[in-house]
Image: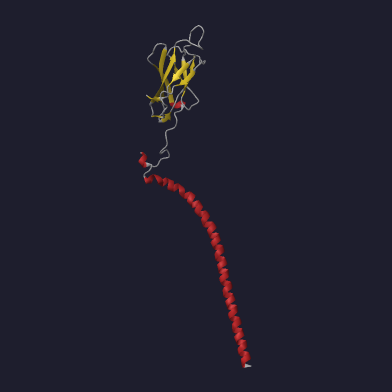
Amino acid sequence: MARIHARSTLAALAALAVGAALAATGCTAGAASSSDRAASAGEAGPSSHASRDDSAGSAPVQQKAPESGKEKGDGQDGPSDNAGQRPPWCTTGALSVSLRPGQPAAGNRYGTLVLTNSSGTSCRTQGWPGLQLTRGDGEAIPTKVVRDHSDPSRPLTLAAGAQASARLHWTVVPGEGDPADGKCPEPAKLRVIPPDQRTSKTASWKLGTVCGAGEIDVLPLRTS
């Protein structure tokens, strides 16, 4: 009987030990599973937050960039929205136009078209203006602008009040395309379209007749 009791006791103790082991294993597995779920949620949350923080943080980095000296080394006093940017194009409204007579030659006439930056800020321009001869009432006179490439076109920056000019050349000798009676038209005005613009300004034309079917050779603008 004592042996049977001892065996029962040992069996009971063994069963208790196995149950305790299984309970411990179950707790450990449950904790690991919970930790994995938390880690998965944590990885999704912080990574998306980190992405937003990076994009939101890019602005301060850009604002601090001038402190590196790169922008200041370009002559800027400090950070500026316009730092490193060129002036805007000279609009028609920013310019005033005028004409100056040139030295005449046999059968040839010359003049200078002057564009003045009448705005209060710098602007830039480049190339050849568009031209249209007119009568006093604004009626168009046949005009053909021929771009003279003997002088290359260059980008120009005009400070407030600064000027750019283009030399004009035409003939006063009647030829093909002119009236049969040899009386070439004498314009009263010149409409001028600055480069890269669509509207015009008008200047008084006091430079005499224009023959050659209204052909005018124009050099590109250059600073006066």
Quadrant assignment, res 44: bottom right
Report whether 2 appears left or right of 139. right
Report whether 58 appears left or right of 78. right
Residue at x 57% of width, y 63% of height: 37
Residue at x 63% of width, y 90% of height: 4
Measured along the vertical axis of the image, is residue 131 above or below residue 60? Answer: above
Give the camera-side residue of 89 and 94: 89
Name the quarter where the C terminus is drawn. Answer: top left
Residue found at the very far bottom of the displayed protein: 1
Measured along the vertical axis of the image, is residue 87 above or below residue 220? Answer: below
In percent of width and height, residue 161 lies at 38, 26
Residue at x 50% of width, y 51% of height: 52
In percent of width and height, residue 42 lies at 53, 60
- Viewer can see residue 77: no
Q: How is the image coloured?
A: secondary structure
Disc tally is 0
- Viewer can see residue 65: yes
In percent of width and height, residue 93 lies at 46, 26
Measured along the vertical axis of the image, is residue 119 above or below residue 112? Answer: below
Give the camera-side residue of 172 and 74: 172
Quadrant assignment, res 169: top left
In percent of width and height, residue 174 lies at 47, 10
Residue found at the very far front of the displayed protein: 150
Residue at x 60% of width, y 87% of height: 9
Name the quarter where the N terminus is drawn. Answer: bottom right
